[in-house]
């Protein structure tokens, strides 16, 4: 796991450099907002990737954690708490719910798990829409308007992204990461080598849900208005999957690149062509799945490898042709 | 009884109407190599599956290393010190050879091992298994013989007291079989109890201190290689009952079948 060594130093450097933006351009609301959302989704993409990329369990239900985090912060804030102090609770609330969801659903394999999470996400949205007394239901929830500056939010979001980056990096090189990689490739073989697969999957789920819950909390504070259709939306869940897939599933840099591209494209196109960015994502996704399944991070690694030296074959993603002859079904001419 | 690291008591495994393993009673001797043979479909791999926790037995009890492990999950059984290799090798393809073995070292038996200690242990195991030069290759780039070796190395890294080897010689060339046989002997010399399913007859007869023969899920013979090769029921199981006596493999000279040089070759009975 010693790939992308220079990149390991590049990320903190990039983070520090970006931290100076509010000092240089304190009143450039466009840049600060774009930064806020990009970092917020970098953090969530990195978090999602711990389960989706490292363990290979692709979840379409993370909006539930985002929404729960958002509502935890919102409700406590309305009860007089300082919003920042509610973030850990927002994370814990999401983490607790991830156990409720994960213990039964993480027993499912591959697509069955993904489909179950769609159900969980949608069920949460509809439940929250109908809990009028708590969530404000369809009319939403108005939150206090006394909030810090955009620069503060920019930095807070950047800090969250840094925490998520550190967590994902740690998980990847730790014993947990080794176990997750093993169970992603062969669940049974991992079990027979002593990996507590059920426990590890749930630990990965809890860690990522916690981070996404905290992001939800920060979002509630930023947006000052919550609506179940907004924070529990399927679009929110899909965004995380797209960010990780476009960037590179199971890589550290993937969600960072993915979120940057995601919001750059959205920001550039949304004003003039409000829904055109969806088409761009779709095309991007198809191109990536076809030509570089490891996403933008894989592409970057490939380019860097080509520049540095004749890349060792072993580092390349498993080329199907070199392992076994592709089993083409008979009858193809 | 307590000295045996692995005891099967009346173990039965049914899949619907099919009785894959029927009332098997065995006590495995510590520090020895026990061969488990039988025709295809005899239930050998199912027995390994039941012991390693992949399937719960329909009836009966399994006692390993002083614990009743019936119904335990595979990871718990592995951490207790009983590890099984897979008949069809299952390396983690995107991990390097070293990382593959690290998985065994990090999660196997005994105390909790941190990732960097696991690396050190894995390197030692790779050296023992003769795979050290391949440490940084992707597991998917290995040849079959190397993958079988990796399968053994990975299991060995879990620090097992009992190692169940499922056809680690199948598909190897004669010279690779000789090397693998040497490796199995060396593992046994470390004090690890070995149970091996094998079809390469000369190898299993030469390696094993004791041979168990399974047919239609029942244990039909249990003894030294010499005893088993002369057993009429075993011959009938392999070749069927015919008008004249058939000999499966060269009749052993009295009782020293286990002593002869390892003849290896194409005498695989099944594939």
Image (cartoon, helix red, strand yellow):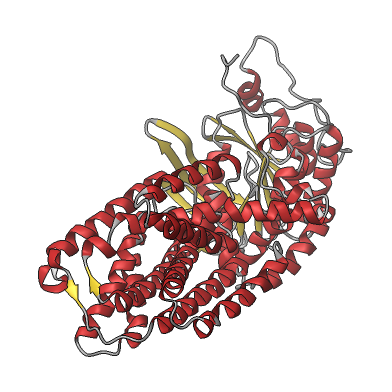
Does residue A115 lie above or below A44 as drawn? above
Please name whichever residue, B75 or B23, is drawn nearer the observer in this view of the structure. B75
Left of A173 or right of it: where is A57? left
Going 64% across and 60% down the picture, which residue do you hit?
B103
| Quadrant holding the N terminus of chain B | bottom right
- In the rendered image, the residue lying farthest to the right is B261
Does residue A282 lie above or below A136 as drawn? above
Q: Position of residue A111 (x, y in %)?
A: 41, 44
- In the rendered image, the residue lying farthest to the top is B243
Going 67% across and 64% down the picture, which residue do you hit?
B105
Q: Quadrant of residue A99?
A: bottom left
Q: Position of residue A92 (x, y in %)?
A: 35, 77
Going 89% across and 38% down the picture, which residue do you hit?
B261
Q: Position of residue A179 (x, y in %)?
A: 57, 61
Q: Is residue B68 visible?
A: no
Q: How many numbered discs, if any? A: 0
Does residue A14 lie above or below A82 as drawn? above
Please name whichever residue, B219 or A243, is drawn nearer the observer in this view of the structure. A243
Left of A159 or right of it: where is B201? right
| Quadrant holding the C terminus of chain B | top right
Q: Quadrant of residue B38?
A: top right
Q: Is residue B59 visible?
A: yes
Please name whichever residue, B198 or A31, is drawn nearer the observer in this view of the structure. A31
Does residue A3 lie above or below B50 as drawn? below
Q: Quadrant of residue B39?
A: top right
């Amino acid at each position: 796991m010693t790939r992308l060594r220079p990149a390991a130093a590049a990320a903190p450097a990039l983070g520090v450099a970006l931290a100076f933006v509010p000092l240089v351009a304190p009143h450039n609301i466009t840049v600060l907002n774009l930064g806020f959302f990009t970092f917020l989704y970098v953090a969530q993409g990195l978090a999602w990737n711990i389960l989706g990329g490292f363990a290979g369990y692709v979840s379409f239900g993370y909006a539930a954690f985002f929404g729960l985090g958002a509502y935890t912060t919102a409700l406590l804030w309305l009860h007089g708490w300082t919003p920042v102090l509610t973030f850990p609770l927002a994370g814990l609330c999401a983490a607790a719910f991830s156990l409720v969801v994960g213990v039964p659903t993480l027993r499912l394999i591959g697509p069955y798990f993904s489909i179950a999470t769609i159900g969980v996400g949608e069920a949460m949205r509809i439940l929250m829409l109908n809990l009028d007394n708590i969530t404000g239901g369809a009319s939403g929830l108005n939150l206090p308007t006394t909030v810090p500056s955009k620069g503060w939010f920019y930095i807070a979001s950047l800090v969250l992204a840094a925490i998520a980056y550190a967590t994902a990096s740690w998980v990847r090189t730790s014993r947990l990461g080794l176990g997750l990689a093993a169970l992603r490739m062969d669940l049974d073989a991992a079990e027979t080598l002593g990996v507590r697969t059920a426990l590890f999957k749930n630990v990965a789920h809890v860690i990522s849900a916690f981070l996404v819950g905290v992001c939800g909390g920060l979002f509630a504070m930023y947006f000052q208005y919550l609506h179940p259709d907004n924070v529990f939306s399927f679009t929110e869940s899909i965004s995380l999957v797209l960010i990780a897939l476009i960037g590179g599933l199971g890589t550290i840099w993937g969600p960072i690149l993915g979120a940057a591209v995601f919001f750059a494209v959205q920001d550039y196109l949304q004003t003039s062509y409000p829904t055109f960015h969806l088409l761009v994502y779709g095309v991007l996704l198809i191109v990536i799945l076809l030509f570089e399944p490891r996403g933008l991070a894989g592409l970057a690694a490939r380019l860097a490898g080509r520049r540095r030296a004749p890349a060792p074959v072993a580092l390349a993603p498993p080329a199907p042709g070199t392992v076994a002859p592709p089993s083409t079904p008979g009858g193809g001419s | 009884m307590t000295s045996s690291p692995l005891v099967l008591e009346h173990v039965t495994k049914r899949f619907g109407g099919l009785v894959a393993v029927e009332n098997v009673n065995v006590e495995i001797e510590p520090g020895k190599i026990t061969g488990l043979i039988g025709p295809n479909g005899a239930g050998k791999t199912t027995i390994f599956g039941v012991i390693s926790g992949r399937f719960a037995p329909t009836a009966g009890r399994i006692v390993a290393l002083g614990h009743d492990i019936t119904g335990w999950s595979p990871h718990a059984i592995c951490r207790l010190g009983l590890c099984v290799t897979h008949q069809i090798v299952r390396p983690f393809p995107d991990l390097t050879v070293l990382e593959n073995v690290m998985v065994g070292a990090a999660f196997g038996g005994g105390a909790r091992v941190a990732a960097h200690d696991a690396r050190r242990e894995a390197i030692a195991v790779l050296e023992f298994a003769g795979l050290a030069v391949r440490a940084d290759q992707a597991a998917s780039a290995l040849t079959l013989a190397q993958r079988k070796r990796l399968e053994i190395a990975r299991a060995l890294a879990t620090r097992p007291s009992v190692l169940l080897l499922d056809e680690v010689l199948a598909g190897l060339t004669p010279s690779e079989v000789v090397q693998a046989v040497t490796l199995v002997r060396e593992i046994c010399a470390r004090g690890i109890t070995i149970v091996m399913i094998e079809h390469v007859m000369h190898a299993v007869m030469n390696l094993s201190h004791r041979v168990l023969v399974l047919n239609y899920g029942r244990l039909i013979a249990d003894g030294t290689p010499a005893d088993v090769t002369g057993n009429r029921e075993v011959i009938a199981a392999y070749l069927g009952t015919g008008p004249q006596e058939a000999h499966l493999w060269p009749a052993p000279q009295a009782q020293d079948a286990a002593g002869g040089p390892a003849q290896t070759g194409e005498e695989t009975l099944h594939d």
